[in-house]
Image (cartoon, coloured by chain):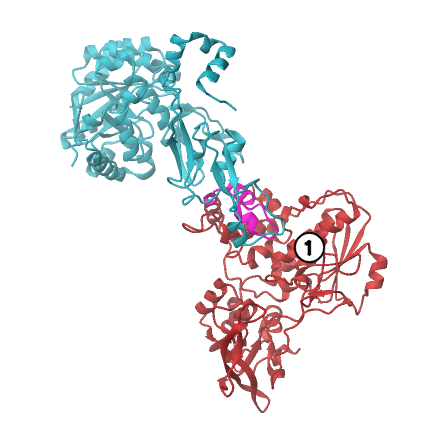
Amino acid sequence: MADLRINFAGIKSPNPFWLASAPPTNTGAQIHKAFEAGWGGAVWKTIGAPVLNVSNRYGAWHYGRQRMLAINNVELISDRPIEINLREIAEVKRAWPDRAVIVSAMVDSKPEAWREIVERIEDTGADGIELNYGCPHGMSERGMGSAVGQVPEYCERITRWVMEAATIPVIMKLTPNITNIVLPARAGVAAGANALSLINTINSIVGVDLDTLELTPSIGGKGGHGGYAGPAVKPIALNMLASLGTDEIVSKSGIPISGMGGIANWQDAAQFLLLGASSLQVCTAVMHYGFRIIEDLCDGLSNWMDEKGFKTIADVSGHSLHRVSEFKNFDLSYRAVARIDKEKCIKCNLCYVACNDTAHQCIDLVSPQGALVDPHSYDVRSNGKHEATETRPQPQVREEDCVGCRLCYNVCPVDDCIAMVEVPSGRDAVTWSELSQQQVEVTEDWEAMKAYRERVGIHIH
Amino acid sequence: MDLASIGNGKREIGKEEIGKALAEQLPPLTPHAAAVEADRCLYCYDAPCTHACPTHIDIPRFIKKIASNNMHGSAEAIYASNLLGATCARVCPVQELCEGACVLGADHKPIAIGRLQRFAMDYAREHRIYPIVTAEPTGRSIAVIGAGPAGLSCAGELARRGHAATVFEKRDMPGGLSTYGIIGLREPAEVALEETRMIETLGVEIKTGIEFGKDVFLAQLQQDFDAVVLSVGLGCTPGLGIEGEEAIIDGLEYIEASKTNPASMNVGRNVLVIGAGNTAVDCATIARRLGAERVTMVYRRTDREMTCYEHEYDFARKEGIEFRFLSQPSRVLLEEGLTVGLECMRVELGAPDASGRPSPQPVEGSEFVLASDQIVKAVGQKKPALLGLKTNKGFIAVDAAFQTSIVGVYAIGDCIRSTGAASTVMAVQDGKLAANAIHEQFFPRQTMAEVR
């Protein structure tokens, strides 16, 4: 059995899964229930400046039958009186000493305001503080949330104020609504933050209602951008996480990172760990299915770790970071082609149309007699299941023309039907970076490129 | 025929009960169920379901329109290839056609294409979405004989191309077998009649109660119209040539009674149905549903040679219908004019006959009696003998353009179906292809490719 315990910047929890600062962590009662279900920790819904909320707070993006592929919200930080929040935080921490209780905070950008909130949080006995520099709606209009997170200098300044006052670990939470996520992360390192977390929600308008022509959600006829979260944002979060893990300053500092953004199952969790997270936060999946999902998050992660021989979360954390690179370092001579398993293929032709309409036109349709045929080439009088299935052509990759784009692999609805198979290119390994050093003219002049291609045997059709 | 005289009146069943017993079997899909099913469709390219459909409806297209809640567009996508989509959605043997070819069928469940099509067609009916005729009138006129699926499809397709089509129908109601010959469990008459009204909105004129060869004649039609299309279907059930045959009820009349006036029907207590095709199963189903205690299908070959679809056979067994194979009727036993039984001979199967199936060989002296108070026969339909037209295996012979041996006279539907099983959807496709061929005759620049 894998050991799921973590010690994240001094914050301990029995497993790496914390509820993110959000509606699921609005009250002590909710967090009690979550801890009973097995959650390792919880980041209390942000406390701080006074706010009022509106109705119709959440929009969602549904795709096909999949509800809530992403959620979008215009809910602000906690609207409950701060005293009640602080009292409940203390109660929860007393009742659950082995769980991580972290308090998210956001106040006006004044040193005294931050000092005061830090002190009040520390009085509860909480294990840590998370600085909310991410909320992209409402609070940002008041100079808080992402209005701070988008300016590295502000991040650094405010974090310094906090670090001067805090005696418990401080996590600086980053907003993804920024061009380069590395810069605020470095600011956090410079200010001495104990940890980073990412990502907060992404600016978004989730849709327009085609009956009312109002935005979704509509708040009395008006709508605006909200914070986007859920499974659909995972790839964005993973990229930002990896950007920090591969940044020299951030990675050398050894600052731990709490990863979040679309974690819905143990597989997502494992991916965040592999790209450098050492604690994980979850929100949308819980808002969709409830606290009970913690059971499979832990169970699935543990089983996978056993299978792979990982003993601790620390073993997994960052394990795939050395695989993260850049285009210029990719081997231009590496060649893979698509191969369709005829036994598994159901002949839906989705690969065929994708390749022929939008990719590189290297999938053919081959009749059972072995002839190349066009789609829709059956006779108008042909019909019936036998004729339709027995004469149906088989999609087949012309490997010599396949550029290995992998589109067919992605659209194929059958598991393991299309494989990307490595084939020898017959060329020596070379990267763009090497090419631009060794044969700079090839990278700058089309004629030289042509000559190079002819020399090494690269055919582009 | 006096329908009330059918059977011996041993079983009474209430009107409401009858309505329920013969009501459309499958409920419509709910919008949610339809959306879930539509989303399951993979949207195959050059989809096999479309190939398998005799009318080549672009099935993934209409299904994805259901998924995107473009119901209007979905109905139009169906009409584009098949004007009788509402009927076909209900009566097509989808297991043998579109659904049988669905790529999802091998591994799990094929898409419920028939029910999705019905969902789209029901929507079209409720919202009065009809195909729109954009063609300018051509000044050409065509007479269509018979308002069954082939004739209606042909007339509708001709109208869409700007021609004036007039349909002559000998029965009181249009729709042919859809109205009279498909059991209500599968298609209520009202659906067929509503579809007929939709065809009329295209500009087709339907004249009922006019019989070809009696009220109108070819010579006159040839004078009044630019072309004549025969979609006359097939005739009544052929004779078995056995003693007491007059006491046997024609299966098609049995079904017709169940659709037009079920309350008048007297169903026997112990019903025998001679035959093992889809119509025979329908007759047996009616008998069972209207209260027969025991219904037995009598067939001279075995379940391996039955001509009904596999799913119809399964359905029949679930209905509690029994089967008596390898039995050839030889005599109806009557007592005081009332049916009391059917004498049959045991059959042994011999070498394959012309149909490719083993030939039934009645065994001398093997007579046995099946007790029964009502016997129905459904052993195919008589082939039409018309106008001295050339025939092929008894069916009207046509060329690739559906033209008969008389120039300008075309034939479509069951009356030309010399190969393969006769079906509504094949009739619809005939009508569409013939309409195009006729149009091409008038305006030669069109190509067959445009039929699809």
Q: Is residue B174 above or below residue A261?
A: below
What is the chain letter for disc 1? B
Residue B328 at what x, y percent from top left? 53, 80
Q: Colour of chain B?
A: red
Q: On the rendered structure, is A175 left or right of B146?
A: left
- Name the residue type under label 1: Gly
Q: Is residue B57 inside the magenta stretch?
A: yes
Q: Which residues are magenta?
A: B39-67
Report the label total.
1
Where does residue B203 sit, x and y in percent of width and height?
Answer: 74, 51
**Which hue is chain A drawn in?**
cyan
Q: Is residue B2 above or below residue A125?
A: below
Name the side, left or right, on which A71 lies relative to B331: left
Q: Secondary structure at mark 1?
A: helix
Q: Is residue A460 left or right of residue A45?
A: right
Q: Nearer the viewer, residue A370 or B61?
A: A370
State which quarter of the image contains the N terminus of chain A.
top left
Closer-to-camera residue (B433/B280): B433
In the rendered image, the vertical position of residue A135 relative to residue A440, given as above or below: below
Quarter location, residue B392: bottom right
Residue identified by numbered label 1:
B431
Q: Position of residue A360 (x, y in %)?
A: 50, 28
